[in-house]
Image (spheres, helix red, strand yellow):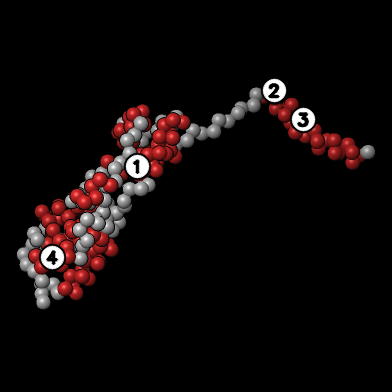
Amino acid sequence: MPLSAAGLEFTILAKTEIGMGNDLTTSPNRANSATRWQPPQLDPSLAAIVDENSLWIERGPLPVLTDAQRKAAEQALAVFDTMPRGSSPEHVAALMGTAALAYPAGKLSAAEADARLAVYQSELADIDSSILGKAFSAAVRDGKFFPSIAELREHARRVPTPRRLIVEARLRRLLANRPKAAIDLVAPGQLSALFQNATQPLKSQESQHAA
């Protein structure tokens, strides 16, 4: 039986286990709100460096972290490593179901709705969930038809990067910025002594062979 847009929305939501969405969905999961991922609180001195946009926009030399700041950055990144990535199938299904209600009734069989949902879930899985939510909203506002995957990805490129992703990227760059190893310069007067010391064993061996 053909499905209207509302029918597509019902079919999608019926296949979605409510309460098991991505932790970063734009529609918060009330059942799991107590365990939703939260960004780490940065050490004040480290936060000041991360938030100083001029350091990053001008692409100048980055400051070298102190041992305490480096430890704080590593601890913060350990929290970022637990952050959900991309968009879950449930999140994509919920966004598609909501978007379908904004368009005139269409005709999709249950099999077509299933196949369409699977393709969207696969091709949009790499996009951050909050970015994808904003992309769907923009596509619904601007489009006369249900947005294609290409249109959604284009809208996603225009969404500003969430702060949590910027902070994570800056912390990783700061940790990678290590001071260059100091080069010990040798005074000219020391070169001959070093050369003699280095070649002394060879001269001893040559003397032994000569004897």
Judged from the image, the secondary structure of the residue bearing numbered disc 4 is helix
Q: Residue at the spot x=23%, y=45% of the render?
A: 160
Q: Earlier in the sequence, mark 1 or mark 3?
A: 1
Residue 10 numbered mark, or none: 4
Return the residue at label 1. 168
Q: Residue at the spot x=16%, y=73% of the render?
A: 110
Left or right, residue 53 beside residue 30: right
Q: CA distance from mark 1 to mark 3?
A: 53 Å
Q: Amino acid at mark 2?
A: Gly
Return the residue at label 3. 196
Query: Of the residues tagged 3 and 4, which is closer to the observer?
Result: 4
Q: Residue at the spot x=21%, y=62% of the render?
A: 16
Q: Amino acid at mark 3?
A: Gln
Q: CA distance from mark 2 to mark 1?
A: 50 Å
Pointer 4 with pointer 2, Cβ within 8 A:
no
Return the residue at label 2. 189
Query: Of the residues tagged 4 and 2, which is closer to the observer?
Result: 4
Residue 70 percent across, percent down from the top left: 43, 34
Few, some or many C-alpha atoms within 10 Å of disc 4 (few <14, some 14-19, many ≥20)?
some
Residue 162 percent across, percent down from the top left: 26, 44
Q: Earlier in the sequence, mark 4 or mark 2?
A: 4
Q: Residue at the spot x=33%, y=48% of the render?
A: 83
User: Vertically, is 54 above or below 93?
Assistant: above
Few, some or many C-alpha atoms within 10 Å of disc 2 (few <14, some 14-19, many ≥20)?
few
